[in-house]
Amino acid sequence: LTRGALTDDGRLAPNNLQKSLASIQTQFLYDDSTQVLRWEAGNEPWEYRRLQEGSTQNGLVAVRIYPGTSQTVVDVLRIKTYLKNWPFMLIEGDEVYTGTCKRY
């Protein structure tokens, strides 16, 4: 799992929170049948909405949109289901995670 966050100068680099969670937040499970994502560290399940079903032609695209008190946050999960090892990109707010799936 590779992780980074948008820095003030426009680069992608791990932030302090990501560094502190690096040893426990190593993988997540996305259940396509329920459209729920859960980090291995055991946080609350997050409900996503699948916008595009994954196939041998197109990748899976799912989003989670939730309004906060001062801003709206949009999380995006993309899995390239048409490629071997199913590479993924998960964007949570301004944090980005990439890697490959163990299974899809």
Image: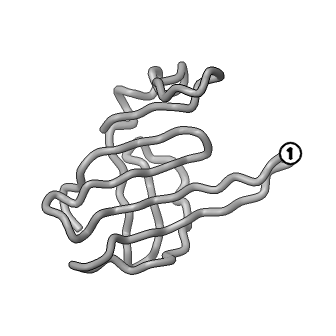
Q: Secondary structure at mark 1?
A: loop
For the residue pair 73 and 80, the one nearer the viewer reads as 80
Q: Is residue 70 left or right of residue 22?
A: right
| Rendering coords of residue 74 (x, y %) | 64, 56
Q: Please, which colouring scheme is shown?
A: one colour
For the residue pair 86 and 37, the one nearer the viewer reads as 86
Q: Residues within 10 Å of mark 1 (few under 14, many from 20)?
A: few
In the rendered view, tell whether residue 50 sits above or below residue 92. below
- Please name the residue shown 40% across and 34% down the image: 3
In the rendered view, tell whether residue 62 sits above or below residue 13. below
For the C terminus, the image quarter is bottom left
- Please name the residue shown 13% across and 61% down the image: 84
| Rendering coords of residue 76 (x, y %) | 52, 58
For the residue pair 52 and 21, the one nearer the viewer reads as 52
Disc 1: which residue: 70
- Please name the residue shown 61% across and 45% down the image: 93
Amino acid on which disc 1 is placed:
Ser
Tally the marks: 1
